[in-house]
Amino acid sequence: MSAGTEAELMARYCDGDRAAFDALYAAVAPRLLGFVVQLVGERALAEDILQETLLKLHEARGFYVRGADPLPWMFTIARHTAFDELRRRKRARVRLVENDDRPPPEPRAGLSGAPELARANDDPAGAEALAALDQLPHAQRQALLLTKVEGLSQAEAAARAGTTPGAIKLRAHRAYVALRKLVRR
Amino acid sequence: MRPVRTRRPRLQLAVVALLSLAALAGLLTVFRPRYDVRSAAVMIVAGLCALAFVAELWWALVPPPGQVLPLRRGAAARVALTWLVMVTALVIAGHDAALGPSVMASARACLLVGTMTALVPALLTLVALRSAVELGGWRLGAVVGGAAGALGALCLELHCANTHLFHVVVAHGGAALLPIGIFAAVAAWARR
């Protein structure tokens, strides 16, 4: 779906058209979810963040400028919501007792959103690469995933990550170098 | 689903600029313009400050084509450069060699008047931007503060006749710089 169509849907959504919201949701939610899964690594948490992002979008829809591409704005809201949630979790971290009878934590989501452990059994080399990818600093991992896995241009990746194309290029290059070292080890 | 009125950045820019200039005119009526307000040097520097105000207000409110958020590349550098150009103009046009005991006497008053003037456009712009302030972070806050500071500097240029180098840099330059720091901190705080 082109940016023009999303802009049109967003404008109709602001005009109170419910069907336009449904169409916009169908068009952008999978992309937003994929982006948030990359950021937080847990599908369930990513789904919560996606819902919160869409609520924020609904509250802030009056800020939309007609004719503009709403996607970079949506990704910025999603990124901020994800970082807020990660920060909140970091603050709320507690020490668990040994006899904790809570269910085991959800496995980390892989690039497609599927549990990572399942992939590890099928493809050990892929699992090793994913583990190495996990060790990269967040900014580098994001740059690599956006440009190489999602196939976005540097400008598109920069808009999504909230930075400049130059920074994305540099981060992706550094991620390559670091990843090569980690996989060779 | 309730329809909402979408943002019209250029209209917001016009409203914020006009209300801010009206507030500036009101303040100048209360505080009185300087005696040589009609001189060419004062007019040139005042024009430059007004230009800086409008340019920074444009960066703060009007997004680049096709974008929703008014975030531009090198926003912080633009604000810093504009401040430097403004202060240089203030120094070149206003500097005289007098060094008396009153050089810094009115500095506190100048800082206060400049910051008071700056509050009007800054608050109006923050209201216009609403949730975008949180998304824009300290850079957007700095741009808003830059615009507000430029109006503060314009007010002081039209009101204060103290043209000593030290006073102009510390008091007038400081009045333009203070809102940048304040609103960058406010936006950074809002992001947490």
Image (cartoon, rainbow, N blue to C red):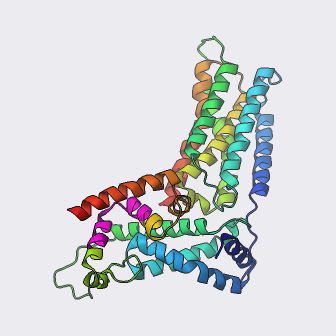
Q: Is residue A88 magenta?
A: no
**Residue at point 64%, 22% (across, down):** B91
Residue A120 drawn at (x, y percent): 27, 81
Q: Is residue A130 magenta?
A: yes
Left or right relative to A55: residue B148: right
**Residue at point 79%, 27% (across, down):** B43
What secondary structure predominates along the stretch shown in magenta?
Answer: helix
**Is B160 or B50 nearer to us in this picture?**
B50
**Residue at point 63%, 11% (across, down):** B97
Using the rendered view, name the quadrant where residue B85 is placed.
top right
For the N terminus of chain B, give its image quadrant. Answer: bottom right
**Is A46 or A147 nearer to us in this picture?**
A147
Using the rendered view, name the quadrant where residue B107 is placed.
top right
Residue B134 position (above or below residue A107): above
Query: Which residue range is magenta in the image?
Result: A128-144
**Residue at point 30%, 57% (across, down):** A178
Residue B109 visible in the displayed image = no
Residue B176 visible in the displayed image = yes
Left or right relative to A136: residue A148: right
Query: Which residue reaches farthest left?
Result: A98
Residue B147 drawn at (x, y percent): 66, 43
Left or right relative to B71: residue A120: left
The image shows a total of numbered marks equal to 0
Left or right relative to B146: residue A39: left
**Is B64 or B26 nearer to us in this picture?**
B64
Residue A167 drawn at (x, y percent): 47, 52
Residue B96 drawn at (x, y percent): 66, 13
